[in-house]
Image (cartoon, grey):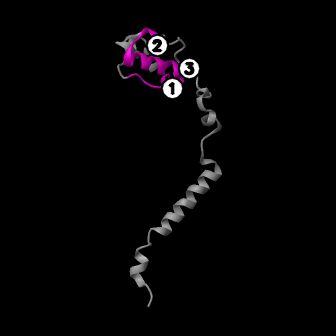
Amino acid sequence: MGTGWRGLSRWWWLGPLIAASALAAVLVWRGGGPADGARAGRGGAVGVARRETRPTLDPARFVGKARLAHQVARDIPDVLDQLYCYCECDKTIGHKSLLSCFTDGHAAT
């Protein structure tokens, strides 16, 4: 005897899964992947001007978590320069981005 409706209902998800996979493959193949600038890697953001131009403070001036945070700011300044600082220091002391906090000691307070 055949499997009938009971055996078919167990595999109902297979058709939509194949269709979704095929659609995703077509989108990636047609250029839905990251642009060349996004593939640049650690070289920094391509085509994005840095807002904060001052150098970060030397991490050796700090201890503990403050030292680690200043080292991260020194290692990836392009990333921090694109992030907003939620203490609103842009309104009170003229900071341009989260990176600004690591140029004047504000991040250690």
Chain-order first, disc 2 or disc 1: 2
Distance (Cα) linking label 2 and label 3: 21 Å
Residue in view at x 52 percent, y 21 percent: 75
Amino acid type assigned to the residue bearing label 1 in the image: Val
* Residues drawn in magenta: 60-85
Distance (Cα) linking label 2 and label 1: 18 Å
Residue 79 in the magenta stretch? The answer is: yes
Instruction: Examine the rendering and report whether any part of residue 29 can be seen.
Output: yes
Amino acid type assigned to the residue bearing label 2 in the image: Pro
Residue marked by disc 2: 59
Q: Nearer the viewer, mark 2 or mark 3?
A: 2
Residue marked by disc 3: 50
User: Residue 10: x and y, percent?
Assistant: 41, 74
User: Residue 95: x and y, percent?
Assistant: 44, 14
Q: Quadrant of residue 104?
A: top left
What element does badge 2 sit on? Answer: helix
Q: How many marks?
A: 3
